[in-house]
Amino acid sequence: MAQVVALVDDDRNILTGLSIALQAEGFDTRVYSDGSAALEALIENPPDLAVCDIKMPRMDGLELLRRLREKSSLPVIFLTSKTDEQDEAIGLAMGADDYIAKPFSQRLLIARIRALLRREELVRARLSGSSKEPPAEIITRGRLAMEPERHRVTWDGIPVSLTVTEFLILEALAQRPGVVKTRNQLMDAAYQDDVFVDDRTIDSHIKRLRRKFREVDREFSGISTLYGAGYSFAGD
């Protein structure tokens, strides 16, 4: 069965062009002209992934993502203009998995879509027990526990809900506490494909990881920054 990608954008030229390109790559597509039209459909009949513009009438992409994240962990890629750096940061902080700036290469966007979908498949295979990979051990680092097979994270026994991207970044850091991982190394761990994302994407995911852990522990300081070099997991 073909994987389904939802496209949400008020620019019909983009909707038509992307839909044709994705269908040529073997995907099924659903198109929506604004966030309001898309919201109920994305929750009630979720696709495998959604590509959403930020600037839209009636309900913009940020509001759509906020409401979506209340009920769903559906992978979301944002489309932004090159002048929307603040919106990019807000979107990633709210739980978007990735973003790509307009004007964009359809080939690059399709590569990002495939990367996210492959990660989702891996997580589902782990959760169902059908993964052909050897079972991964539970990662315990002080108060942190990570169960890759269940995509489960706890801090002091309290569950912390992470997106796939956030989980893979944290896993890469926690595997070697105290060792600084560069942004490029974290990109490789999180995307696992020949897909380029810039430094802001990793920085935004790190900020969201810290925010999520501080929701369960105000004193959380498990992720350290070495300015100019990268990040490390300090543990507690």
Image: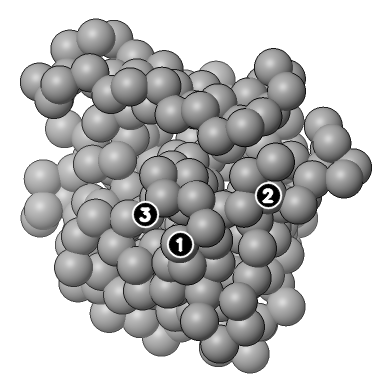
Describe the element under mark 2 as helix, strand or loop. loop
Q: Is residue 198 left or right of residue 201?
A: left
User: Which residue ends up furthest to the right in the rendered image?
Assistant: 218
Q: Say what secondary structure mark 3 lies in.
A: helix
**Is 59 on the left-hand or right-hand side of 107?**
right
In front: 189, or 100? 189
Where on the picture, by quarter, is residue 21? bottom left
* Nearer-the-camera pick, 201 or 104: 201
Instruction: Name the residue tied to disc 2.
Output: 222
Q: What's under tag 3, amino acid-wise?
A: Ala
Q: Which residue is mark 1?
A: 179
User: In the rendered image, is residue 11 in sight?
Assistant: no
Q: Amino acid at mark 1?
A: Val
Q: Residues within 10 Å of mark 1 (few under 14, many from 20)?
A: some
Q: CA distance from mark 3 to mark 2?
A: 19 Å
Residue nearer the viewer, 223 or 159: 223
Amino acid beneath label 2? Gly
Task: Residue 14: give x, y in percent of width and height.
Answer: 39, 70
Q: Nearer the viewer, mark 3 or mark 2?
A: 2
**Marks 3, 1: nearer the viewer:** 1
